[in-house]
Amino acid sequence: MYAIVEIAGQQFRVSEKDRLRVPLLDVESGKKVVFDNVLLFHDAKDKVTVGTPTVPKVKVTATVVEHGREKKVIVFKKKRRKGYQKKNGHRQDFSLIEITKIGASAARAKKAAAPKAEKTEENKEA
């Protein structure tokens, strides 16, 4: 069972017990977070549901394990023959999450359909 879910503008393929590095989430470590932007859901019965744009009633629950920073990426700018050089570094923040549950949320009980009024000759004339 897996799902494709949108987290912070990026799409991730997730399964239960997966650990992912996602862009920094504004949630404390150890807290649960629920993602409801599920774009595709593949259940245990090999049934694939594609959302338009999202799959209704399917949610992904995860726990934030830790926050951190990626390795430094060097940005080097240079203009040839002019002596212009700039060296910069960038470290992106991330959150490490562990997927705990994928599946449909509690389905609401459907209301019983009201019986349709039968057409009588009085209703037909009006």
Image (cartoon, rainbow, N blue to C red):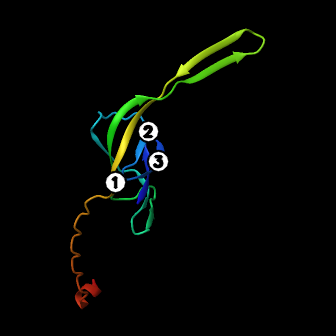
Q: Quadrant of residue 63?
A: top left
**Is 117 on the left or on the right of 1, as rendered?**
left
Furthest-top residue in view?
A: 83
Alpha-carbon span between mark 2 and mark 1:
19 Å
Badge 3 marks a residue whose secondary structure is: strand
Q: Quadrant of residue 84?
A: top right
Which of the two labelled residues, at mark 2 and mark 3, occupies the earlier sequence position? 3
The residue lying at 26 percent from left, 63 percent from top is 107
Image coordinates of residue 33 in percent, x first then y, are 31, 43
Image coordinates of residue 66 in percent, x first then y, are 35, 34
Q: Which mark is residue 12?
A: 3
**Is 4 on the left or on the right of 81, as rendered?**
left
Q: Quadrant of the C terminus?
A: bottom left
Q: Which residue is mark 2?
A: 21
Furthest-bottom residue in view?
A: 121
Q: Are marks 3 and 1 in contact (CB under 8 Å)?
A: no
Please say if 82 is above or below 5: above
Give the camera-side residue of 112 and 44.
44
Q: Which residue is mark 1?
A: 59
The residue lying at 39 percent from left, 37 percent from top is 96
Give the camera-side residue of 94 and 108.
94
